[in-house]
Image (cartoon, rainbow, N blue to C red):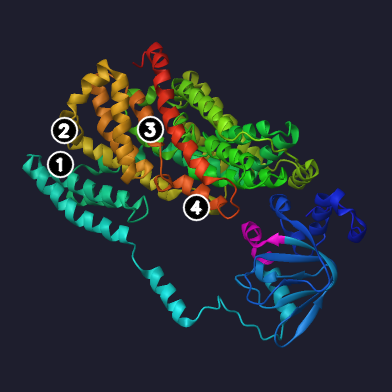
Amino acid sequence: MENFFSSADFNSLNISEYQSEWICSYLLNDEIFSKVDNKELARLLPHIVVKSFKSGQTIYTQRQHAQYLYMVVTGDIKVFSDVSSMTIGSNGKIGVESCSDLTHYVTCATVLSDATVLMIPRDKIDALKVNKEIKGAFILYLLENFAGNSVAVEEDAQPSSVKAVVTKDKDKVPLSKVVGWVCVVIFSPLALWQSYVQGLDLNAIFVVGTLTATIFMWIFKLVDEFVPGIFALLAFLCIGVAPPEVVLSGFTSDGFFLAMSVLGLGTVIVISGLSYRIILWLILKLPKTQFVMNLILIFTGIVLTPIIPTANGRIALLSPFLKNIIETCKLMNGEHASSKLAFSTFTGATLLSGMFLTSKSVNFVVLGMMPAQVQEEFQWMSWLVASFVTGIIMLTLVYAAAQLTYRNQEKITVSTEQIRMQLRLLGSLSLQEWSAIAGILFFMLGILTYSLHKIQPPWIGLSILYGLLLFGCLKKKDFREKVDWPFLIYLASVVGIIQTMKAVGINSLIAKHLSMLIPYMHYNFGVFVLILTVIMFVMRIVMPINAAIVLIAAVFMPLADIAGLNSWLVGFIILVLGEMWVFPYQCSYYMQFHDMNVKDKTYDEKSFLRLNMLVNILKLAAIYVTIPYWKMRGLL
């Protein structure tokens, strides 16, 4: 690894003035951290704290949770257990348990003479993509320091009786799952019987019974989201309700290959560090005000929306940046300024999911339900053109609401030195980053010039994926582990279920029973949107986002064809309405966002949830405001 600092006497440096450079130089001269990749050190740098301890202070005690690694810069620290002790001086490390699988410190640490240390959080060390050699170095350091010590490596200090209760509770099946399986057992046979009473043919009866069981598995989250889809396909194939090429059509669909290609490209963007570099560069170059910082987070989320096809993935990528900005800008957690930044992060990553075809898996599913002619018409760019007015209106209204909700006078102070040091650590663009940039540009260029070459976006995406694999920019290990294969199976299975429903005539049957809504769809579209909103709201109380969208789309999109409406318009509105939620449990990516920020209490959850309820109304308002635009384009 290149060390671009000379080895210096760290005691003589002014820590407050040169802190980032000083910390970086210290790490690069350390025997273990010098082996860590510069990109990983750049991510670690904002989380390292310089702290001074006075003589006689206790840094940690035995059996205390191993939360930090301490790198001793100056001073002497006594590390001891019941049977032995040793003194750690400058350039030493204590609390190395935090770099291993040990959850608690096995010794006590007390300051002998005034000491300065670098504190590195355990979770940030765990997040480092270190190889076995570096992990082994930490473990070896721990063994060398404490060889011969009799250490009690206990997971906790709980009595065995308490441990037994905890184990018993962990093995206990949640009541919701018990209720869910009971519903599967009871309602699936009832659905079979009711279908028989209604006079459906045998194949349709089996499809209804299987679909009922599948839906209840989704509603109660009895298993992982993709497993019910496999169950449904397997049942259809074993019973023979439709030909295998129909049941398995999802695995050969354009949406499947496009989703796989975009997931592959998104993987390269994340693992290459390109997105991290862009955010650091934006913070460095743009004015350091609350307004600009919020725009950075919103803009970054919007840019990532068409590139990373999952809201959970975008939340996972942006949440660390939110924490970094709050820490770097020295804002108070839970106050209006940090809450607004949190809301901007969440909004940028999720608000425009329906606006871009490639932003979410379920978009591909909805696209696959449309007639072939409509699918060909509404590829990436045409989808964006038809939806961008709604997106702009939603973004404008939501941002204005956030500004009014989180008015404050907090000042932002950003360490330009730290940002420069992080960028310096990242170095020049790597081959992976260049390949990610080339992939994005090639994909966008291919879509924009579709009218000239007539190559469908899925095959453009597959060509990019092939190139990334061919030149080693996407390794086999990353392709296997980082690409969301369970989602791809879920996507293919849902498309297969919908095609099987069509094959046995269930969609026509549903359309017949809901034909009363056709006049509203044709003559009073505004009333139809309101009815659709109510139906979606009720369904979302008990069903996850994707399952509710797929089920409602399967019901209403065939009706759109009968009513003479463009099925894309109905599908798009369903996608927007499906993202509306009130209670946290209704939104998996909000739960993820909450879990990633709850420890630091980054934002005020009560005001966040109240503002989200207003966002639901603003989304509906944006749909109504866009109706004249859709009429002008001939979609209504």
Report the residue at 32% width, 25% height from top. Answer: 529
Q: Residues within 10 Å of mark 2 (few under 14, many from 20)?
A: some
Q: Nearer the viewer, mark 1 or mark 4?
A: 1
Compute the Cα span from label 1 to label 3.
29 Å
Compute the Cα span from label 1 to label 2.
10 Å
Residue 509, label in figure? 2
- Residue at the top extreme, as displayed: 632
Do tag 2 and tag 4 residues touch (Cβ < 8 Å)? no
Label located before the other in sequence (3 or 4): 4
- Residue at the bottom extreme, as displayed: 83
Report x, y in % for residue 366: 35, 33
Residue range highlighted in magenta: 120-135
Q: Amino acid at mark 1?
A: Ala
Of residues 343 and 354, the one nearer the viewer is 343
Report x, y in % for residue 495: 32, 39
Q: Could you say whether the residue bearing mark 2 is in a helix, strand or loop? A: helix
Q: Nearer the viewer, mark 1 or mark 2?
A: 2
Compute the Cα span from label 1 to label 4.
37 Å
Q: Which residue is mark 3?
A: 577
Q: Which residue is mark 1?
A: 204
Report the residue at 45% width, 33% height from top. Answer: 614
Compute the Cα span from label 3 to label 4.
33 Å
Do tag 3 and tag 4 residues touch (Cβ < 8 Å)? no
Q: In the displayed structure, does residue 57 sit left or right of residue 277?
A: right
Report the residue at 33% width, 31% height from top. Answer: 533
Where residue 15 sits, quadrant-wise, is bottom right
Q: Is residue 544 visible?
A: yes
Whether residue 133 is in magenta: the answer is: yes
